[in-house]
Structures are given as C-alpha cells and as structure tokens.
Amino acid sequence: MSAISDYENLKKMVTEAEDDVRKADGGNKAAGTRVRKRMQEIKQAAQSVRVKVLESRGGEEGGAPAQPEAGE
C-alpha cells in the first residue's frame, strides 16, 4: 500500500469508531472495550502511514534529528 491509501484507511477507521466512542462516552462498557481495541488498530495504521512517508523521502527511522531551520 502507498502512504495515501494507508492514510485513507486510517480516516475510514476513525470514522467507523465514532458510534462506539459516543456509546462509550455514555457509559456503555462493551463499547468502551471495542473503542480501546479499535484505537490500538488505529495506532498501528498511523504508524504505517508514518513509515511509508519516511520511506518515500528516503529517510531512515532513528536517524539524527533534523536541524532546525534558521529563524525557528
């Protein structure tokens, strides 16, 4: 998958979680369990987007931090 398709999947996952988030906010414990599971999946999907973006620019994970640009 490309970064854009991973990102689109991430947006879809967040949208699909909305009903359960609302139910969990209202006190529904089962919905809370589903939300926690879904948030873990969303976290993994976000990491996939992050990795794809790094790959697309040729960067490596764990490299030296970028130097701030002048004026920052």
Image (tube, rainbow, N blue to C red):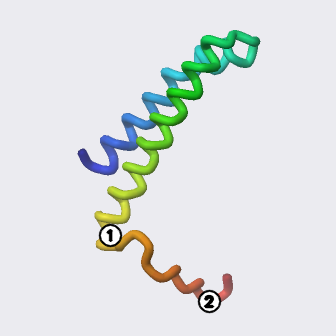
Assign the C terminus to one quadrant of the image.
bottom right
Q: Looking at numbered disc 1 in the image, what kind of residue is underneath it?
A: Arg
Which residue has dot 1 on it?
Answer: 57
Assign the N terminus to one quadrant of the image.
top left
Tell me which residue sits at (32%, 69%) in the image. Answer: 57
Residue placed most toward the observer, 49 or 62? 62
SS for callout 1: loop
Tell me which residue sits at (59%, 15%) in the image. Answer: 19
Q: Alpha-carbon neighbours of circle 2 within 10 Å: few (<14), some, or many (≥20)?
A: few
Image x and y of residue 32, in percent = 64, 19
The disc at residue 3 is none
Tell me which residue sits at (45%, 29%) in the image. Answer: 13
Image x and y of residue 61, in percent = 40, 69
Which residue has dot 2 on it?
Answer: 70
Q: Looking at numbered disc 2 in the image, what kind of residue is underneath it?
A: Ala
- Above or below, 52 against 26 in this view is below
- Above or below, 71 against 44 in this view is below
Using the numbered discs, state the Cα–Cα distance from disc 1 to disc 2 in whole angstroms: 22 Å
The disc, 1 or 2, on the residue closer to the chain's N-terminal end is 1
